[in-house]
Image (tube, rainbow, N blue to C red):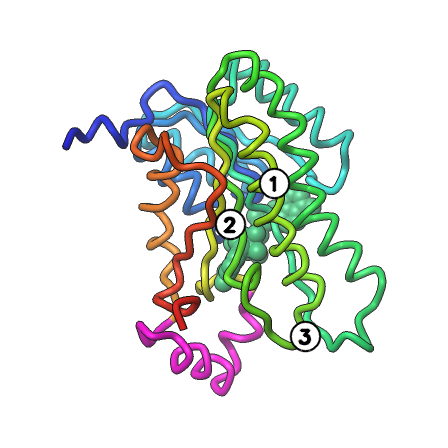
Amino acid sequence: MSLSLFDLKDKVAMVTGSTRGLGEVAAIALAKAGANVAVCGRNRTDLQRVSAAIKDLDRNSEGFFLDVTSKESVHQGVKQILKHFGKIDILVNNAGVNHREPVMDYPEEAWDLVINTNLKGYFLVTQAVGPQMLERGYGKVINMSSILGTVAMPNQVAYASSKGGVDQMTKVMALEWAKQGIRVNAIGPTYFETELVAQIRNDPERYNFINERTPAGRWGYPIELEGIVIFLAAPASDFITGQTIYIDGGWTAC
Ligand SMILES: NC(=O)c1ccc[n+]([C@@H]2O[C@H](COP(=O)([O-])OP(=O)(O)OC[C@H]3O[C@@H](n4cnc5c(N)ncnc54)[C@H](OP(=O)(O)O)[C@@H]3O)[C@@H](O)[C@H]2O)c1
């Protein structure tokens, strides 16, 4: 086996929502494997902080303000990234939000925010990045899904719907672009300790429920995302497309 199968030297990656959490881990992982990285999000201090950390790895990196819920912001952001780097080889659709409430109490605004960020946002960004991938006949799109794309939990109606949608969107895009050198896959994480799930992490009962429900007996550590992100971005996964790969300590196996 050659390690060049995992080499991302001279590749350009764009990661949405990489100002913290799993997106930050993904951006740094891709840089560690050799890629130059466009860090995207809305918090300018964190954009600066993450891109500085990537520059410390001797990669080209810049922070770009990009709100995935706004078509105009997406197009502006992608235009600036292409101007700076000249191309985007790897797109990680990661920006995500959640709102937990029972179906009957679920506010319409919360539904719209979750769906517009987690599902429509992925669609808008991929549509903006896709043309130059199609033109060059090369691209890797990685969509951050969740175990909730396939298993359900109470109080997560919009989030689970968005992630189920992401899994289906991944398959449709994979089929449309399979002959054109573009691979589209999704990652389905279980609970990882980030701000998104702070509410659950800080509640001992719910925290332990996750530990007990997981065959491996614990939550995921954000750093454990690195391997799957590099794999799906690298030549090692060139014949894999349309898949959701779970990183869940066995949750979806039972
Ligand atoms: N943590 C978990 O347990 C877990 C499990 C399964 C799946 N996931 C998925 O992993 C992804 C990242 O989650 P996380 O846990 O890392 O969450 P997080 O720590 O809350 O980070 C979310 C990121 O999304 C960005 N974001 C939110 N709304 C945005 C918008 N409208 N435009 C652009 N960026 C936006 C945030 O950046 P700004 O606020 O700076 O814009 C932030 O960088 C999500 O898709 C989530 O569904 C997480």
Q: In this view, does 248 lie to the left or right of 141?
A: left
Distance Cα–Cα, label 2 vs label 3: 25 Å
Q: Is residue 98 left or right of residue 47?
A: right
Question: Residue 101 colored magenta?
Answer: no
Residue 211 visible in the displayed image: yes
Question: Which badge, 3 or 1, comes first in the chain's sequence?
Answer: 1
On the image, the x and y values in percent for residue 64 come to 60, 30
Check the image and name the residue furthest to the right.
Answer: 108
Magenta stretch, residue numbers: 197-218
Mark in the foreground, 2 or 3: 3
The quarter of the rendered structure image containing the C terminus is: bottom left
Up the image or down, 167 lies above or below 88; here it is below
* Amino acid at dot 3: Asn
Density class for disc 2 (Cα within 10 Å; few <14, some 14-19, many ≥20) is some
* Amino acid at dot 1: Gly
Pick the residue in front: 248 or 196.
Answer: 248
User: Which residue position is annotated with label 3?
Assistant: 155
Q: Residue at x 49, y 74 (%)?
A: 201
Q: Are marks 2 and 1 in contact (CB under 8 Å)?
A: yes
Disc marking residue 41: 1
Q: Do the residues labelled 3 and 1 touch (CB within 8 Å)?
A: no
Disc marking residue 20: 2
Density class for disc 3 (Cα within 10 Å; few <14, some 14-19, many ≥20) is some
* Amino acid at dot 2: Arg
Check the image and name the residue furthest to the left.
Answer: 1
The quarter of the rendered structure image containing the N terminus is: top left
